[in-house]
Amino acid sequence: MENQTPDYTYKNVIQIEDADSSRKFMAGVFLWMFVALGISAATAYIFATPQFFSLLIDTTTNQVNGLFYVAMFAPLAFVLIMSFGMNKLSYGVLSVLYILYAAITGISLSIILLVYTPASVLGVFLTTSLVFGVMAVAGYTTKTDLTKFGSLLFMGLIGLVIASVVNMFMHSEMMSYIVSYIGVAVFVGLTAYDVQKLKNIGAGIQYGEASAKKMALMGGLTLYLDFINLFLYLIRIFGRRR
């Protein structure tokens, strides 16, 4: 159910210190991020209701339906299609894929609403929002070049994937907690790193062009994935099960 942040490479972008262009670009990035979060939250709430959750798992027989596997594995396919096809796909097609991705991710997150108490889910969501907001502001305003931390964060991300796969077989609760704490640290750092990277990209493009709009959408996807992963790791640590 985790969504790992893809490492996007934006080519042919001339870095020019244009604060106004950067602000407009970042406004578009955060708009797309909030759109995805809203869609995911709505679909998660809808599919947490008994009549829709039965489309995922038959509660009478505990049999997993086909939509469950679609919700679990389709998000990764959507991310790969959008990231590798960004230059070939039109802005309209990319937007539709983005919306579908957010909706399917919301379906997969509906399970969280059934496993954890509503109060703890809300508390963790607010905590995630606060932490994300602080790190986003830090990444946007800091004068320190965070690119030197990029390789370390990427290695941490790879380590998280490997440790998570290993723990699927070990079923170690202690290792799960360790991975969760490391995951929080990695995505806290990635939030600041990605915001600064996107800010620099925004300063070097003429916002309003189709390519700029597509990069804003993909930037929104990057921050959306940072937020969702941060939320998932925090819910593992602080969430209270029903």
Image: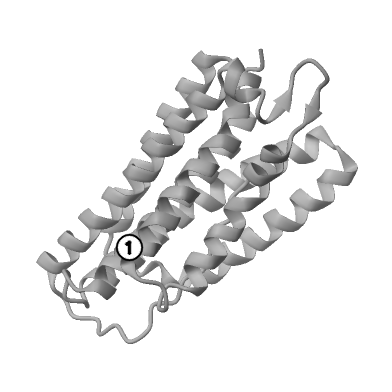
Amino acid, disc 1: Gly
Q: Nearer the viewer, residue 27 or 153?
A: 27
Provide the secondary structure element on which disc 1 rests: helix
Q: In the drawing, does residue 214 fall left or right of residue 81?
A: left
How far across and how far down the image is residue 22, in percent?
A: 19, 66
What residue is at 35 percent from the left and 48 percent from the top? 33
Q: Which quadrant holds the N terminus? A: top right
Q: Is residue 116 above or below residue 8?
A: above
List x then y, in percent, for residue 138.
31, 52
Let me know if residue 141 appears in the view. Answer: no
Residue 52 image point, x, y percent? 58, 24
Mark 1 = which residue? 92
**Percent of width and height locating residue 189:** 47, 54
Using the rendered view, name the quadrant where residue 217 is placed.
bottom left
Outermost residue, left side: 20
| Residue drawn at the location 14% of the way across and 68% of the way down | 21
Q: Eyeballing the image, is 89 above or below 120?
A: below
Extreme residue in the right direction? 170
Residue at x 39% of width, y 55% of height: 96
Say if 227 sits above or below 154 in the image: above
In which quarter of the view is residue 38 placed? Answer: top left
**Foreground: 154 or 91?**
91
The way the protein has been coloured in the rendering is one colour
Location of the C terminus by quadrant is top right
Left or right: where does residue 49 sit relative to residue 115? left
- The answer to whether residue 137 shows anywhere in this view is yes
Label 1: how many Cα within 10 Å (few below 14, some 14–19, many 20+): few
57 on left or right of 7: right
Residue positioned 75% across, 18% down in the render:
59
- Number of marks drawn: 1
